[in-house]
Amino acid sequence: GAERPDAHADLSQIDGDINMISHKARWDTLRTFQMYSDYDSYGIATNGAHFYVSTWDTTWFFKYEMNGLVIDAFEIESVKYIRDMTFVPSRQHFFGVHPDSSVIYEMDFYNHTLVRTIPIQCTGVSAVRHISYDGALDNGKGGFWLGGFKSMGAVDMEGHQLVAGNQISANWTNIFCYGTAYDRSEFFNPKLWVTGILHPNGDSSKPIPFVKAFDIETRTLSDDMYQVDYTGMTGWQVNNTFAGGACAYTENGMTYLATVFQIGEYYDTNLGVVFELNQVGIDEQSKDSQGVELLPNPVQNQCVLNLNGFEAREVNIYDALGKLVFTQNVDTHNEHSVTLDVSALHTGLYTVLVSNLQEIKTIKMLKR
């Protein structure tokens, strides 16, 4: 493929201009870090171990430590112009979109290959430029929230429509969506964080970067917004525009939102910024520390236990008093997930134990 400027430089020598700040309150800044690819960094996603950043005009991707230090650059020649990305833990793949295509790109960043393209079939959604994985969609089978500057919808893992764009209640007047990040750190209120720019009174000459919450339960875009102020951040003048995507992740009991901003002059240096969102609540207990996950949670009738490589043999569910109320033998030698029918259980909080001969995983489950 085409050689990118400085693509073969010794990335370990780049200090990344990392700035650490931490206050443990929503919208405080944990850190900022300069993008190695200065002017065209766009989408950002994480597998919990590293950040990966795409470029809007090339086939190159960059890998960062979670502290913002760039450590690798690689090319996937058949994938370009990626605006936003998301990570799917059960597949260990990243998924990306760009507005000139009507497909989702499934990518293996460990082997630097395109796995497949998934056609998007969603009414009212076009020129797709943002995407977020939601494991609770499609009755726990998983799917994606996605859309364009002024649209939002949802599809399953094969790109088939789950929520049409016209089923979303949102006032898109004077706002443009650049990225979304799925966040379930508040147990009863899973949401998408929508990042974008606001044109006050339609004036595009004075764009204001913002973050809004999209309520997944009610499918509404909040009227409230956080307007980003970067005055003096790292000594650069912010250009008042989002450069690209977003992702959310949990680390050491705190949920964070990572974004990429354009700063300085037009197409000048780009900046990675990590915001603090909130302390992790009971919802994070729906996922075991080693990756076993129960979706959807809360559950009404059926849920899916995503095992992520854990070879389970038995599932036991206990009520709040410690009484065994559900048991299911499973053989998951070649299976990635198990479906549980808990429709007979009463409303309440339960403990799910997933075990084999050597190990037990514990997950909290809320039955509605």
Image: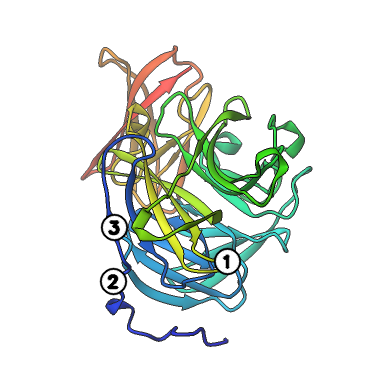
Q: Residue 321 sits in which quadrant?
A: top left
Residue pictured at 32% horizontal, 33% vertical: 280
Query: Element type at marker 2?
Result: loop
Q: How many marks?
A: 3
The correct choice, above or below, for 162 with respect to 67 in the image is above
- Residue 178 x, y percent position in the rendering: 60, 51
Residue at image mark 3: 19
Residue pictured at 70% horizontal, 38% vertical: 201
Residue pictured at 41% horizontal, 22% vertical: 366
Give the foreground label among 2 and 1.
1
Crowding at mark 3 (Cα within 10 Å: few <14, some 14-19, many 20+): some
Nearest the eye: 325 or 14? 14
Crowding at mark 2 (Cα within 10 Å: few <14, some 14-19, many 20+): few
State the separation of the CA atoms marked 3 and 2. 11 Å
Relative horizontal placement of residue 251, taking residue 226 as reference (left or right): left
- Residue 177 x, y percent position in the rendering: 62, 46
Identify residue type, mark 1.
Tyr
- Residue 196 x, y percent position in the rendering: 58, 47
Residue at image mark 2: 15
Identify residue type, mark 3.
Asn
Identify residue type, mark 2.
Asp
Give the foreground label among 1 and 3.
1
Relative horizontal placement of residue 256, taking residue 216 as reference (left or right): left
Query: Element type at marker 3?
Result: strand
Residue at image mark 1: 266
